Image (cartoon, helix red, strand yellow):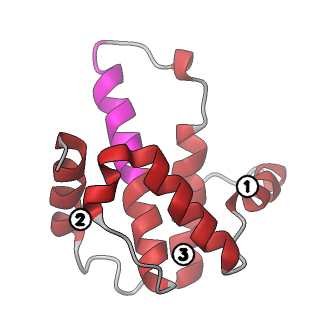
């Protein structure tokens, strides 16, 4: 298991059960908010802690994606996050087969100009 997968696993253990009262819609909103942070311009980060902040954004998105996937009954394997982009793509495609097209929802969300914390 990669260091990233270990960090993701530890983060999930720390937050396990804290979002039990969140609705599926709330979980989806969190995925959209976290993904929009990932898609922000990489050159916008500055300062000595830019790498830690970028890693935190990656972890937050994957945690949100896993939570939404759990709620919709999509299976995942933390060790698959050793190649995180491949596993993200797989989970995003699985969401799409259930009618949750993240790319289209992000475009709609951008039109509303709402910002949610990730």
> What residue is disc 3 on?
26
Q: Residue at x 29, y 21 (%)?
A: 49
Q: Secondary structure at mark 3?
A: helix
Q: CA distance from mark 1 to mark 2?
A: 25 Å
Q: CA distance from mark 3 to mark 2?
A: 17 Å
Residue 76 image point, x, y percent = 37, 71
When the figure is inspected, residue 59 is found, relative to residue 97, above or below; the finding is above
Task: Give the left or right position of residue 37, taking residue 20 as reference.
Answer: right
Most foreground residue, 25 or 87: 87
Q: Nearer the viewer, mark 1 or mark 3?
A: 1
Residue range (magenta): 48-60
Q: Residue at x 40, y 68 (%)?
A: 66
Tally of numbered tags: 3
Q: Residue at x 20, y 60 (%)?
A: 9
When the figure is inspected, residue 94 is found, relative to residue 22, above or below; the finding is above
> What residue is disc 2 on?
12
Disc with the residue nearer the chain's start (1 vs 3): 3
Q: Residue at x 19, y 49 (%)?
A: 7
Crowd band around label 2 with a 10 angstrom C-alpha radius: few (<14), some (14–19), many (20+): some
When the figure is inspected, residue 8 is found, relative to residue 72, above or below; the finding is above
The answer to whether any part of residue 57 appears in the image is yes
Residue 63 image point, x, y percent = 37, 60
Most foreground residue, 59 or 47: 59
Most foreground residue, 88 or 29: 88
Q: What secondary structure predominates along the stretch shown in magenta?
A: helix
Name the quadrant containing residue 50.
top left
CB under 8 Å between callouts 3 and 2?
no
Q: CA distance from mark 1 to mark 3?
A: 17 Å
């Amino acid at each position: 298991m990669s260091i990233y997968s270990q960090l993701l696993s530890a983060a999930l253990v720390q937050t396990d059960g804290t979002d039990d009262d969140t609705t599926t819609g709330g979980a989806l909103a969190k995925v959209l908010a976290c993904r929009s942070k990932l898609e922000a311009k990489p050159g916008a980060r500055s300062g000595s802690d830019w790498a830690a902040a970028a890693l935190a954004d990656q972890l937050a998105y994957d945690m949100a994606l896993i939570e939404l996937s759990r709620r919709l009954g999509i299976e995942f394997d933390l060790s698959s996050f050793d190649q995180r982009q491949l596993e993200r793509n797989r989970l995003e495609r699985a969401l799409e087969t259930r009618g949750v097209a993240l790319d289209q929802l992000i475009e709609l969300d951008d039109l509303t100009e709402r910002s949610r914390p990730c």
